[in-house]
Image (spheres, rainbow, N blue to C red):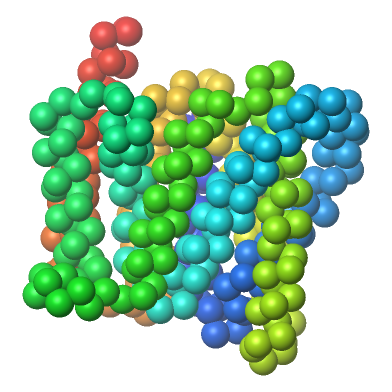
Amino acid sequence: MAYLLLVLTTLFWSGNFVLARAMHLDLPPITMAFSRWLLALLIILPWLLPRLWRHRQLIAANMGKLIFFGVVGVAGFNTQVYLGLQDTTATNAVLMQSMVPIMILILSALFLGERESPKQWLGVALSFTGVSFLVSQGDLSLLLALQFNQGDLWIFGAILVWAVYSIGLRWKPKGLDGFTFFGATVVVAVIVLAPLCAWEVSRVEPVSWSRDVLLTVSYMAVFPSILAYIFWNRGVAELGASVAGLFIHLMPVFGLLLSLLFLGEKLYTFHLWGVALIFAGIYLAVISDTLKKIKEKN
């Protein structure tokens, strides 16, 4: 069951990218992020409020950390993803998302002094080459001319932000259970996004809250937010973080398939080169050592 839950989690996350791209003309990016998290908060609020009250002293003592995690990991990451999907394809976005483990390695080495092997740095180089193929659409001369797609830059920013958030989780407030931590960061994100959403609404055409828009927001609030979180925790609890982490690499596969099926996006040769190099890099830098450690434990 744990394996199925982790597969569903990555499927839900991939669907979030595809839906955001599909609805980018109907729902502005900041409004999309705010609506998603506001609805998610309203859904979990009956279970969250008693926990917030019970842990109020611990929350007050760690308010700075919770603000950081809420701003960076919830509000910052998702909003940048939605901003990026205004200009880039869902295919590019979800393939670039697979760079997260590599970015974590780089930031850990730069700021935490963690040493990586030459094999891991070779993996980093291969993955960056793969991303270069994606953002340049196979024409590396664009990189020399610095002609990046603005959407790809937003997605790269989201990857950087998520890596910072993931590294920062080692300083997550002790004594705060996972659900309460998640709920508290969602509260922070909603508070931060509210004025930004009001600013965006004042600058764009009024949103037409059609049936499709409402269904999109409902999906984003329930599946990639609440259910994915619950499923991911269950998978990590049963299989361990090292095994569960491998499932995130299904996102490019699901994202590519969903984009081809529902958005009519085309598959080009540079996509194949890009994903091949990214996966080769991830295998060298992350998966091979993880599988080795799992084998040694058994």
Q: Residue at x 58, y 73 (%)?
A: 29
Q: Residue at x 63, y 64 (%)?
A: 33
In this view, 291 is above or below 246: above
In this view, 296 is above or below 22: above
Quarter location, residue 177: top right
Camera sees residue 112:
yes
Q: How many marks?
A: 0
- Viewer-side residue, 85 vs 225: 85
In this view, 138 is above or below 157: below
Camera sees residue 179:
no
Q: Quadrant of the C terminus?
A: top left
Q: Residue at x 50, y 71 (%)?
A: 83
Rendering coords of residue 44 (x, y %): 80, 46
- Viewer-side residue, 62 vs 245: 62
Rendering coords of residue 79 (x, y %): 56, 63
- Viewer-side residue, 240 vs 72: 72
Q: Quadrant of the N terminus?
A: top right
Q: Residue at x 26, y 74 (%)?
A: 148
Rendering coords of residue 17 (x, y %): 48, 63
Horizontal arrangement in the rendering, residue 112 relative to residue 291 (left or right): right
Horizontal arrangement in the rendering, residue 95 relative to residue 74 (left or right): left
- Viewer-side residue, 35 vs 116: 116
Horizontal arrangement in the rendering, residue 160 relative to residue 236 (left or right): left
Rendering coords of residue 68 (x, y %): 61, 43
Quarter location, residue 131: bottom left
Horizontal arrangement in the rendering, residue 104 relative to residue 134 (left or right): right
